[in-house]
Image (cartoon, grey):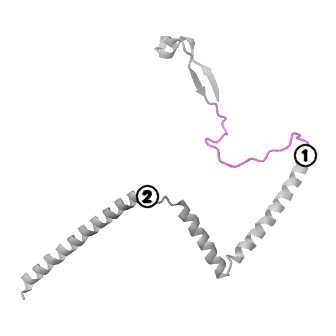
Amino acid sequence: MTDELDRPDAAADGDSDAESGSSSRTAVVSRQVGDPLRPTGKRSRRRGAGDGADDVESTATELDAEDAAAAEKAKKKAKKKAEGPSRNPFVFVLNFLKQVVGELRKVIWPNRKQMVTYTAVVLAFLVFMVALVAGADYGWARLVLLVFGE
């Protein structure tokens, strides 16, 4: 990205910054044809400074050694995953309780005033719903008695 000064004849175009004497800067972004629009997060492997044949061979040998080491790590990881979690129930319960405590530490607990407000709202809603269901029950009971008689 480069910064370029605006044209000196910007006042003729009606640019207010040029009239006041302050120079504004415009960012110009130049992008190559093959460049991605956004970064992909992948790192490219870069070769050494020399372009000689032995540099290419040594790089290929180093890459083969790195690939072999990565393959060994993958095998170990796969073997560990194949074993699965510990079968010891005490370890399982202990791990579960540690995770529960960790999650409870993330909770934002309400203070006393918020707790009283929330409780009042819940109780008011409960009273309203009980009255609504009781009224509907009473209405249906009267209707059934009216249709079928006593």
Amino acid type at mark 2:
Asn
Residue 118 at x, y = what percent? 36, 61
Q: Which residues are magenta?
A: 30-56
Judge left or right: residue 3 versus residue 79: left
User: Compared to 145, does 28 lie above or below?
Assistant: above
Residue 27: quadrant of the picture? top right
Q: Do callouts 2 and 1 mark residues in contact (Cβ within 8 Å)?
A: no
Residue 4: percent from left, percent from top: 62, 21
- As drawn, is 23 to the left or to the right of 53? left
Q: Secondary structure at mark 1?
A: helix
Q: Quadrant of the C terminus?
A: bottom left
Name the kind of residue labelled 1 in the image: Asp
Give whichever of 60, 128 is nearer the camera: 128
Q: Residues within 10 Å of mark 1 (few under 14, many from 20)?
A: some
Label 2 and label 1: CA atoms lie apart by 67 Å
Please identify the residue farthest to the front as the structure is shown. 112
In front: mark 2 or mark 1? 2
- Tell me which label, 2 or 1, sits earlier in the chain: 1
Q: Residue at x 84, y 54 (%)?
A: 63
Q: Quadrant of residue 145?
A: bottom left
Residue at the disc numbered 2: 111
- Percent x, y of residue 60: 86, 52
Quarter of the image where the N terminus is located:
top right
Q: Is residue 110 above or below residue 137?
A: above
Residue placed furthest toward the right: 54
Q: Which residue is mark 1?
A: 55
